Image (tube, rainbow, N blue to C red):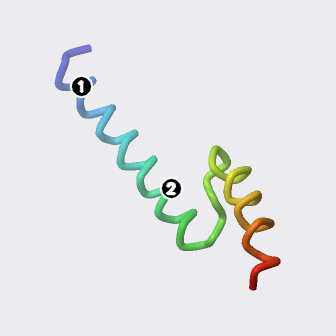
Amino acid sequence: MTPLDQARRLARAERRWLADAHDRLRRGRPDPRTAARTRTDRTVKEPQR
């Protein structure tokens, strides 16, 4: 595998990851890695409203 192939594959994976994250944001489904944090944030913010 040439360095160019590696770069191309990495760029494709990166683009897919970005599109995924964007899709998730638009649909309002948080990233599983940050879901726990946002859930606790919501429970903290709700009583103040």
User: Among all residues in the image, which is located at the extreme bottom?
Assistant: 49
Badge 2 marks a residue whose secondary structure is helix
Instruction: Quadrant for residue 42, please give it.
Output: bottom right
> Which residue, given by chain and number where applicable, does mark 1 sit on?
5
Badge 1 marks a residue whose secondary structure is helix
Q: Is residue 28 left or right of residue 44?
A: left
Q: Residue 12, position in %: x, y?
A: 34, 41
Q: Is residue 34 left or right of residue 23?
A: right
Residue 28 versus residue 5: which sits nearer the camera? 28
Amino acid type at image mark 1: Asp
Could you tell me which residue is drawn at 50 percent across and 56 percent down?
21
Could you tell me which residue is drawn at 70 percent across and 62 percent down?
41
Q: Is residue 6 left or right of residue 21?
A: left
Mark nearest the camera among 1 and 2 is 2
Q: Residue 24, position in %: x, y?
A: 57, 63
Q: Does 12 sit above or below residue 19?
A: above
Q: Residue 20 — which label?
A: 2
Amino acid type at image mark 2: Asp
Residue 15 versus residue 2: which sits nearer the camera? 15
Could you tell me which residue is drawn at 43 percent across and 49 percent down?
16
User: Among all residues in the image, which is located at the extreme front?
Assistant: 48
Placement of the C terminus among the 4 image quadrants: bottom right
Distance between mark 1 and mark 2 Cα atoms:
23 Å
Residue 37 versus residue 4: which sits nearer the camera? 37
